Image: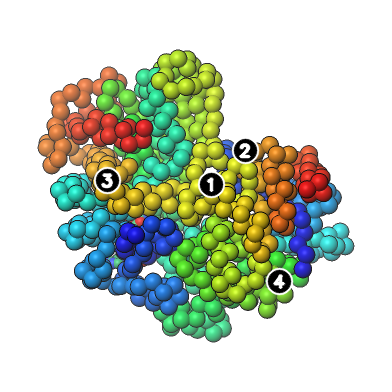
Amino acid sequence: MTMQRILFGDNQFFGVNHMSEEKARAQLMRFESDQAIIDVLDIAYEAGIRVFMCTTHDRIAVICDHVRAHPTRYADFEFYPCMPYAHKYANAVTEHGMFEALKLFLPKEGAIGALMKSGVSVATKDMQGIARLLIDAEMKMFHGLRTPVIWLQNVVTDLLLGSGFNDAFRYFADHVKAKYGAEPGFITMNMPKLLDVLEAQGIENPIICANINKLGFRMCPGIAQYEALIATRRFRPVAMSVLASGAIPPREAIDYVCRQKNIKSIVFGASSRGNIQETKRLIDELSAAA
Amino acid sequence: MVRLGLIGLGKMGVSHLAIMRTHPDAELVAVCDTTRYVIDTLAKYTGVEVYSDYKRMLREKQLDGVVIATPSRFHAEMVRDALEHGVHVFCEKPFCLDPDVGQRLADLARQRGLVNQVGYHYRFVSAFREAKRLIDGGALGRLHHFRAEAYGPVVLRPKNSTWRASKSEGGGCLYDYASHAIDLVNFLLGEPERVGGTVLNTIFSRDVEDEVYATLFLAGGVTGQIAANWSEDSHRKMSTKMSFWGTNGRLTVDRQETQLYVRDPSVASIPLKAGWTMSYTTGLSENQAFYLRGEEYSAQIDHFVRAIASGDTDTVSTFATAVATDRVAAMMKRDAAGLPEPAAASGLVASGSAAVSSPLPPSATLVRPVRAPWPALFRRARALVS
Ligand SMILES: NC(=O)c1ccc[n+]([C@@H]2O[C@H](COP(=O)([O-])OP(=O)(O)OC[C@H]3O[C@@H](n4cnc5c(N)ncnc54)[C@H](O)[C@@H]3O)[C@@H](O)[C@H]2O)c1
């Protein structure tokens, strides 16, 4: 599979901004209505962007419905879903405790449902089974849509990575390939460490999405390690936070990424027509120049 | 390699687990939790050595340091046991619920020369450290007022079955949310001498408060308001914000950014420009060896590991500073209940010099002022940051 060069992200729709809470809130207000999100996606689509990389936030289900309802208009539109929407789980764990929260997200029927009834100590013996069910629950909203890459979201990736739950990456990869015919992708703030672990798990030429920006913002342990890794190792890096939430001027930011030839794709989010078109144009121009 | 153990593998504990296991200079030797499925799962899938009895872990493992992330009512006993084993301790916040108990543990740690730290991670957030640099550098001139706010979505309906809903277990918005704001006040300005007009209200919970409001009175006539509400779901996660007003300008800071307004730059001892200056996490934060949810969580564990390695027990968030925070929380509880301050709480010095220039709210006039040795703490905190 060849990955698309430009992926359109969704942080701006859900109030994620690393520079300012005020900006984040203004964006949340602006994108209260689903139509406002769809309008921006349409601008991106018209500008020639074909991929929407989005979290499995409840509101994305509405976008999925919209795309399903207009198959000709979005003939070559693809989703690269990121799962899970971690706040949903974190808040449920705070409110109900770990076991009750897990129960909430798992189907009541079926083998695992039965296992959960007999107690979590039995159920956790089959983490692979639980993982499959959680993935399926998150994927429901994309039914009938193209999802050639499915991402594991960074808080989960990094929690598993840090705690040494390395098998989980293979569970994820295997299931995403087998059931959805998709490529597994992994989002992380700790790219060098993750690449080693994925390779050790036999996940070849993995797709890894991480912050890659000229400032070195959230590139752990450091920007130099990232640059060396990208230049020398076999994997498919995807750059996000390229503009560091607006801290780097666009041309300079994109130039930095495009000079690293092994970077396969760039994720960016924007909400105005001008910014979307300008960023797309810059990526096209600087990718060709590099 | 610093040999570490971890007690409590709940929401906070698993985050510590990931950070401790990846620390380049630490080895996570063993973990402990009383919930069977948690340790069985961890043992099976991550290969970490597990215990269900922390005392046994302390006896058997020759740990250098331990991180305690159990529900708050267990902290005191576990901290004491660890100290008595000669083990350096990092304890989650709030520290002890009872400031007298906390003070004794702070004394014990000092007597034994052990590193002691509490998980008030906002002290490690780059934007709040920048705020400290600006305030200590005199950017605001004479600071006279502040506001400390914490909002987030923890309790959004009456039913909540976890320990956070139980008063006796250290639940409630005061310990869970307001304590962070109080600790930031202590960190940035010093410990309040008195509190007044405290409101501890329930919105949804039966047993604990969901919102906290109070006026804090600091030395030199500095006053401030604190507001915390954990039933506020317009915020996706906890959001903490501080604002400061001084004779030379104002400063607002949250996790992401600082916004400084300066009237006359020449007043300060650090380079500044007149008007507005903003700084952002994207420029302020530094990469850690491992990142999870925010640099501050890794930074505080890294600080703990380094303190153990170097033997420097004077951490950025010591038991002593956390006791000061517990002490303010206790004052707020008494104030809300209309109880007088105890005449001479242990470890505190009663003071007659609490005449504050501003008029006192009625409830505060009943309160016998109690003064902690905060200037010393303040000086030390300043020294640490500079
Ligand atoms: N710094 C922060 O912002 C922050 C955030 C969340 C929690 N905390 C603090 O961390 C602590 C834990 O909170 P949490 O949300 O992780 O709670 P939690 O309920 O999710 O987890 C607590 C864990 O401790 C275990 N435990 C209970 N008794 C034990 C014992 N005797 N021995 C070993 N393990 C035991 C439980 O089984 C559970 O796994 C609290 O003090 C809390 O205030 C701090």
Find residue B151 and report its image quarter.
top left
Q: Closer to the N terminus: mark 1 or mark 3? A: 1
- Three-letter amino acid code at disc 3? Asp
Residue shown at 45% from the left, 34% from the top: B130
Label 1 neighbour load within 10 Å: few <14, some 14-19, many 20+: few
Q: Given contact means CB atoms under 8 Å apart, are the residues at marks 1 and 3 in contact?
A: no
Nearest-to-viewer mark from 3 and 2: 3
Find residue A189 and report its image quarter.
bottom right
Q: Chain of mark 3?
A: B
Nearest-to-viewer mark from 1 and 2: 2
Q: Which label number is shown at residue A182? A: 4
Q: Chain of mark 4?
A: A
| Residue picked out by circle 3 | B312
User: Does the numbered disc 4 mark a residue whose Cβ is under 8 Å from ligand 1?
Assistant: no
- Three-letter amino acid code at disc 1? Ser
Looking at the rendered structure, whether the residues under marks 1 and 2 are on a common chain is answered as no
- Give coordinates of residue A187: x percent, y percent: 60, 59
Give the CA separation, mark 4 to mark 3: 52 Å
Residue shown at 73% from the left, 67% from the top: A147
User: Does the numbered disc 3 mark a residue whose Cβ is under 8 Å from ligand 1?
Assistant: no
Label 4 neighbour load within 10 Å: few <14, some 14-19, many 20+: many
Hey, which residue is sitting farthest right in the picture?
Answer: A72
Looking at the rendered structure, whether the residues under marks 4 and 3 are on a common chain is answered as no
